[in-house]
Amino acid sequence: MLFIRFLFLFALLSNIALYIYARQNMPKQERFLAVDPGVKKLVLLSEQDVENTIWEEQEAQTANSEVAFNQVCYSVGVFNAKSEIQPVLDALKNNVLKIRTRKVISTQEAGYWVYIPALKSRQEALGIGRKLSENSIEDYYVVTVGENENTISLGLYRDSINADARLQELISSGFNAEKQIKVEQWPEFWLDYAIASDQLENLPNITEINPDIVANNVECNW
Protein backbone atom coordinates (compact mmCIF):
# COMPACT_ATOMS: atom_id res chain seq x y z
CA MET A 1 0.00 0.00 0.00
CA LEU A 2 2.85 2.35 0.90
CA PHE A 3 4.58 1.50 -2.38
CA ILE A 4 1.46 2.48 -4.38
CA ARG A 5 1.29 5.90 -2.64
CA PHE A 6 4.97 6.48 -3.35
CA LEU A 7 4.48 5.54 -7.00
CA PHE A 8 1.53 7.95 -7.30
CA LEU A 9 3.47 10.87 -5.77
CA PHE A 10 6.48 10.15 -8.00
CA ALA A 11 4.29 10.23 -11.14
CA LEU A 12 2.61 13.49 -10.03
CA LEU A 13 5.92 15.23 -9.32
CA SER A 14 7.34 14.00 -12.62
CA ASN A 15 4.43 15.53 -14.55
CA ILE A 16 4.84 18.86 -12.73
CA ALA A 17 8.57 18.94 -13.44
CA LEU A 18 7.96 18.12 -17.11
CA TYR A 19 5.41 20.90 -17.41
CA ILE A 20 7.77 23.51 -15.87
CA TYR A 21 10.62 22.41 -18.17
CA ALA A 22 8.41 22.64 -21.24
CA ARG A 23 7.21 26.16 -20.32
CA GLN A 24 10.72 27.44 -19.74
CA ASN A 25 12.01 26.11 -23.05
CA MET A 26 9.00 27.07 -25.17
CA PRO A 27 9.99 29.59 -27.96
CA LYS A 28 8.62 33.07 -27.33
CA GLN A 29 5.89 34.24 -29.69
CA GLU A 30 6.39 37.57 -31.43
CA ARG A 31 3.77 40.24 -30.82
CA PHE A 32 2.38 41.78 -33.96
CA LEU A 33 1.01 45.32 -34.15
CA ALA A 34 -2.20 46.11 -36.01
CA VAL A 35 -0.39 48.82 -37.97
CA ASP A 36 3.23 49.78 -38.52
CA PRO A 37 4.67 52.46 -36.23
CA GLY A 38 3.98 55.99 -37.43
CA VAL A 39 0.95 55.10 -39.54
CA LYS A 40 -2.06 57.29 -38.73
CA LYS A 41 -5.33 55.73 -37.65
CA LEU A 42 -7.83 55.28 -40.48
CA VAL A 43 -10.83 57.60 -40.15
CA LEU A 44 -13.99 56.68 -42.01
CA LEU A 45 -15.69 59.40 -44.02
CA SER A 46 -18.80 58.87 -41.92
CA GLU A 47 -16.78 59.88 -38.83
CA GLN A 48 -15.64 63.19 -40.30
CA ASP A 49 -17.54 66.43 -39.88
CA VAL A 50 -17.65 67.53 -43.52
CA GLU A 51 -20.49 70.04 -43.15
CA ASN A 52 -19.04 72.28 -40.43
CA THR A 53 -15.43 73.44 -40.38
CA ILE A 54 -14.23 75.22 -37.23
CA TRP A 55 -11.18 77.47 -37.08
CA GLU A 56 -9.93 79.03 -33.84
CA GLU A 57 -7.31 81.63 -33.00
CA GLN A 58 -4.52 80.41 -30.74
CA GLU A 59 -5.76 82.83 -28.05
CA ALA A 60 -9.16 81.15 -28.08
CA GLN A 61 -7.67 77.97 -26.64
CA THR A 62 -6.41 79.84 -23.54
CA ALA A 63 -9.29 82.30 -23.14
CA ASN A 64 -10.32 82.69 -19.50
CA SER A 65 -13.87 82.50 -18.18
CA GLU A 66 -14.20 86.31 -18.01
CA VAL A 67 -13.50 86.68 -21.74
CA ALA A 68 -15.89 83.84 -22.52
CA PHE A 69 -18.57 85.52 -20.41
CA ASN A 70 -18.17 88.87 -22.19
CA GLN A 71 -18.22 87.45 -25.71
CA VAL A 72 -20.92 88.22 -28.25
CA CYS A 73 -21.82 86.07 -31.24
CA TYR A 74 -22.95 86.79 -34.78
CA SER A 75 -24.19 84.78 -37.74
CA VAL A 76 -23.28 86.26 -41.13
CA GLY A 77 -25.03 85.40 -44.37
CA VAL A 78 -26.49 84.28 -46.45
CA PHE A 79 -23.76 83.14 -48.87
CA ASN A 80 -24.89 81.38 -52.02
CA ALA A 81 -21.62 79.45 -52.40
CA LYS A 82 -18.99 78.30 -49.95
CA SER A 83 -16.28 80.08 -51.96
CA GLU A 84 -17.93 83.43 -51.13
CA ILE A 85 -17.18 82.94 -47.42
CA GLN A 86 -13.38 82.93 -47.60
CA PRO A 87 -12.79 86.70 -48.11
CA VAL A 88 -15.03 87.53 -45.15
CA LEU A 89 -13.46 84.82 -42.98
CA ASP A 90 -9.99 86.15 -43.77
CA ALA A 91 -11.08 89.67 -42.77
CA LEU A 92 -12.55 88.55 -39.43
CA LYS A 93 -10.37 85.71 -38.16
CA ASN A 94 -7.62 87.84 -36.58
CA ASN A 95 -10.11 89.70 -34.37
CA VAL A 96 -12.44 86.96 -33.15
CA LEU A 97 -12.34 84.27 -30.47
CA LYS A 98 -13.70 81.54 -32.70
CA ILE A 99 -15.26 81.25 -36.12
CA ARG A 100 -16.88 78.53 -38.24
CA THR A 101 -18.63 77.97 -41.55
CA ARG A 102 -22.03 76.33 -41.64
CA LYS A 103 -24.04 74.74 -44.45
CA VAL A 104 -27.85 74.70 -44.29
CA ILE A 105 -30.23 72.98 -46.70
CA SER A 106 -33.21 75.27 -47.28
CA THR A 107 -36.53 73.90 -48.46
CA GLN A 108 -39.66 75.51 -49.84
CA GLU A 109 -42.84 74.28 -51.46
CA ALA A 110 -42.58 74.36 -55.23
CA GLY A 111 -46.13 73.31 -56.07
CA TYR A 112 -48.65 70.49 -55.90
CA TRP A 113 -48.52 67.44 -58.13
CA VAL A 114 -51.73 65.62 -59.02
CA TYR A 115 -51.16 62.09 -60.28
CA ILE A 116 -52.38 58.51 -60.44
CA PRO A 117 -49.91 56.20 -58.65
CA ALA A 118 -47.72 53.88 -60.70
CA LEU A 119 -49.48 50.98 -62.37
CA LYS A 120 -48.04 47.47 -62.60
CA SER A 121 -47.20 47.74 -66.30
CA ARG A 122 -47.01 50.23 -69.14
CA GLN A 123 -49.98 48.56 -70.83
CA GLU A 124 -52.10 49.08 -67.70
CA ALA A 125 -51.00 52.72 -67.48
CA LEU A 126 -51.92 53.29 -71.13
CA GLY A 127 -55.28 51.67 -70.46
CA ILE A 128 -55.98 54.18 -67.68
CA GLY A 129 -54.90 56.90 -70.09
CA ARG A 130 -57.54 55.80 -72.58
CA LYS A 131 -60.18 55.92 -69.84
CA LEU A 132 -59.09 59.46 -68.99
CA SER A 133 -59.54 60.45 -72.65
CA GLU A 134 -62.98 58.86 -72.67
CA ASN A 135 -63.86 61.17 -69.76
CA SER A 136 -62.64 64.23 -71.72
CA ILE A 137 -59.49 64.47 -69.59
CA GLU A 138 -56.74 65.07 -72.12
CA ASP A 139 -53.96 66.85 -70.23
CA TYR A 140 -52.19 63.85 -68.73
CA TYR A 141 -48.80 62.25 -69.21
CA VAL A 142 -47.67 58.65 -68.70
CA VAL A 143 -44.20 58.60 -67.12
CA THR A 144 -42.06 56.09 -69.01
CA VAL A 145 -38.72 56.19 -67.13
CA GLY A 146 -37.29 56.79 -63.68
CA GLU A 147 -38.60 56.15 -60.19
CA ASN A 148 -42.14 57.23 -61.20
CA GLU A 149 -42.34 54.90 -64.19
CA ASN A 150 -45.94 54.00 -65.16
CA THR A 151 -47.27 56.85 -63.03
CA ILE A 152 -49.82 59.09 -64.74
CA SER A 153 -49.08 62.78 -64.21
CA LEU A 154 -52.13 65.04 -64.23
CA GLY A 155 -50.55 68.43 -63.63
CA LEU A 156 -48.29 70.49 -61.37
CA TYR A 157 -50.07 73.42 -59.71
CA ARG A 158 -48.69 76.40 -57.80
CA ASP A 159 -52.01 77.00 -56.06
CA SER A 160 -53.31 74.37 -53.64
CA ILE A 161 -56.93 75.34 -54.44
CA ASN A 162 -56.49 74.55 -58.14
CA ALA A 163 -54.74 71.26 -57.31
CA ASP A 164 -57.58 70.25 -54.98
CA ALA A 165 -60.19 71.09 -57.63
CA ARG A 166 -58.37 68.92 -60.16
CA LEU A 167 -58.07 66.12 -57.63
CA GLN A 168 -61.78 66.15 -56.81
CA GLU A 169 -62.67 66.15 -60.52
CA LEU A 170 -60.63 62.98 -61.04
CA ILE A 171 -61.92 61.22 -57.94
CA SER A 172 -65.50 62.06 -58.92
CA SER A 173 -64.83 60.41 -62.30
CA GLY A 174 -63.71 57.22 -60.54
CA PHE A 175 -59.92 57.61 -60.80
CA ASN A 176 -57.58 56.83 -57.93
CA ALA A 177 -55.80 60.19 -58.04
CA GLU A 178 -53.57 61.64 -55.34
CA LYS A 179 -51.87 64.94 -54.53
CA GLN A 180 -48.25 65.39 -53.48
CA ILE A 181 -46.44 68.52 -52.32
CA LYS A 182 -43.33 69.13 -54.43
CA VAL A 183 -40.40 70.84 -52.74
CA GLU A 184 -37.26 72.60 -53.87
CA GLN A 185 -34.00 72.33 -51.92
CA TRP A 186 -30.82 74.34 -52.19
CA PRO A 187 -27.72 74.89 -50.00
CA GLU A 188 -27.09 78.10 -48.08
CA PHE A 189 -23.84 78.96 -46.33
CA TRP A 190 -23.32 80.95 -43.12
CA LEU A 191 -20.36 82.22 -41.15
CA ASP A 192 -20.65 82.21 -37.34
CA TYR A 193 -18.18 83.93 -35.04
CA ALA A 194 -17.71 84.91 -31.40
CA ILE A 195 -15.84 88.03 -30.33
CA ALA A 196 -15.02 89.75 -27.04
CA SER A 197 -17.44 92.64 -26.55
CA ASP A 198 -14.63 95.16 -26.14
CA GLN A 199 -13.22 94.20 -29.56
CA LEU A 200 -16.31 94.99 -31.61
CA GLU A 201 -14.96 98.36 -32.72
CA ASN A 202 -11.95 96.64 -34.28
CA LEU A 203 -14.05 94.59 -36.68
CA PRO A 204 -13.81 95.46 -40.38
CA ASN A 205 -16.90 96.46 -42.35
CA ILE A 206 -17.71 93.16 -44.03
CA THR A 207 -20.48 94.68 -46.17
CA GLU A 208 -17.73 96.38 -48.15
CA ILE A 209 -16.49 92.90 -49.05
CA ASN A 210 -19.93 91.49 -49.80
CA PRO A 211 -22.88 93.94 -49.81
CA ASP A 212 -25.44 91.13 -49.95
CA ILE A 213 -24.73 89.72 -46.47
CA VAL A 214 -25.99 90.74 -43.03
CA ALA A 215 -24.53 90.07 -39.56
CA ASN A 216 -27.23 88.95 -37.09
CA ASN A 217 -26.63 88.92 -33.34
CA VAL A 218 -27.28 85.37 -32.01
CA GLU A 219 -26.89 83.39 -28.80
CA CYS A 220 -23.42 82.01 -28.07
CA ASN A 221 -24.48 78.36 -27.86
CA TRP A 222 -21.69 76.70 -29.87
Image (tube, rainbow, N blue to C red):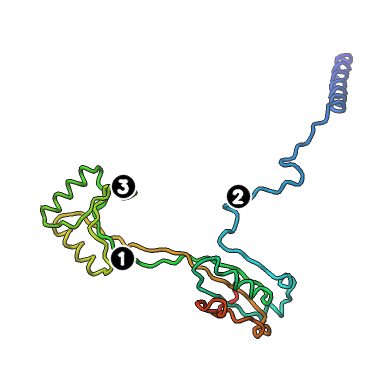
Q: Which residue is mark 1?
A: 111
Which residue occupies the foreground of this view, 111 or 25?
A: 111
**Where in the figure is residue 76, as x and y percent of width and height?**
55, 75
Q: Is residue 211 left or right of residue 172?
A: right
Tell me which numbered mark, 3 or 1, is placed earlier along the sequence.
Answer: 1
Q: Which residue is mark 2?
A: 44
- Label 1 SS: strand
Task: Tell me if mark 2 has few (under 14), some (14-19) or many (20+) residues whose alpha carbon lies within 10 angstroms of its own.
Answer: few
Tell me which numbered mark, 3 or 2, is placed earlier along the sequence.
Answer: 2
Q: Could you tell me the amino acid type at mark 2?
A: Leu
Circles 3, 2 touching at the beta carbon (< 8 Å): no
Q: How many numbered circles are shown?
A: 3
- Label 3 SS: loop
**Where in the figure is residue 95, as x and y percent of width and height?**
68, 77
Q: Is residue 74 left or right of residue 37?
A: left
- Label 2 SS: loop
Which residue occupies the foreground of this view, 173 or 77?
A: 77
Q: Which residue is mark 3?
A: 145
Quadrant of the rendered image containing residue 68: bottom right
Determine the CA span between mark 3 and mark 1. 22 Å
Determine the CA span between mark 3 and mark 2. 35 Å
Task: Tell me if mark 3 has few (under 14), some (14-19) or many (20+) residues whose alpha carbon lies within 10 angstroms of its own.
Answer: few
Q: Is residue 28 left or right of residue 40?
A: right
- In the rendered image, the vertical position of residue 192 relative to residue 36, given as above or below: below
Marks 3 and 2: which is nearer the front?
3
Marks 1 and 2: which is nearer the front?
1
Which residue occupies the foreground of this view, 89 or 99?
A: 89
Tell me which numbered mark, 1 or 2, is placed earlier along the sequence.
Answer: 2
